[in-house]
Image: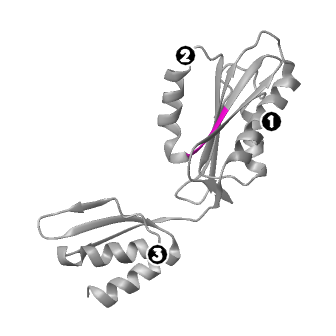
Amino acid sequence: MQTVKSIHFCRYEVKKSIFISYVTPINEFETFRAKLKIEHPKATHIVWVYRYINEFDQIVENGSDDGEPKGTSAQPTLNVLRGLSGVNLSVLTIRYFGGIKLGTGGLVRAYGTAAKMVLEKADFIPYEKRENFCFTCKYHFVQRAEYFLNKIGVDFKNRDFETDEVIWRLKVNINQKEEIARFLSENFV
């Protein structure tokens, strides 16, 4: 399974209809969809799909044809994501109607092609299950903890500075979790 770290887009034209596709990490889906609705008020359709892994390690999928004939837009896009084993991401495709009807088969091909094109531009990374991990330390250990977390590639921006300690709230993979536990036992206990 694989996912993306950042937003990518591409533009595709078929019989004067313009398709603009975006791929986003799942955590940016809702805000990005709202942004597209504001930025493209004259778009005929904004079709979207997403796939993510929930807390029970199940793949959750959903999509909207946004007024296109049922099964002609979201389903082909979702099939492309399935074929690439893409998870924790979404694809949104904006369509500006060009005046020439594409027909059911034409829509399926157009939305599938738009999805393939944007996913070809995306920088995929292997999917890793991440868990919440929390620990506290005194202020004089903060710099040492930051250095260590940087060294093992953990994003540590989510932390709370209390009156006498720092509370760290991290998302880590299993290897990082083991390394942090070892580091904490060697340095703070």
Q: Which quadrant would residue 62 be assigned to in this image?
A: top right
Task: Specify the segment rendered in magenta.
Answer: 21-25
Mark drawn on residue 113: 1
Residue 55 as seen in the image, left or right of residue 70: left
Mark drawn on residue 41: 2
Q: Secondary structure at mark 1?
A: helix
Q: Which quadrant would residue 144 be assigned to in this image?
A: bottom left
Q: Quadrant of the N terminus?
A: bottom right
Q: Residue at x 88, y 25 (%)?
A: 105
| Number of numbered callouts drawn | 3
Mark found first going from the N terminus, 3 or 2 = 2
Mark found first going from the N terminus, 1 or 2 = 2
Residue 38 painted magenta: no
The picture places residue 17, in percent across and down from the top left corner, at 76, 18
Name the residue type under label 1.
Thr
Q: Residue at x 29, y 87 (%)?
A: 187
Task: Judge the density around disc 2: few (<14), some (14-19), many (≥20) Cα neighbours within 10 Å.
Answer: few
CB contact under 8 Å: marks 1 and 2: no
- Classified by dominant secondary structure, the portion drawn in magenta counts as strand
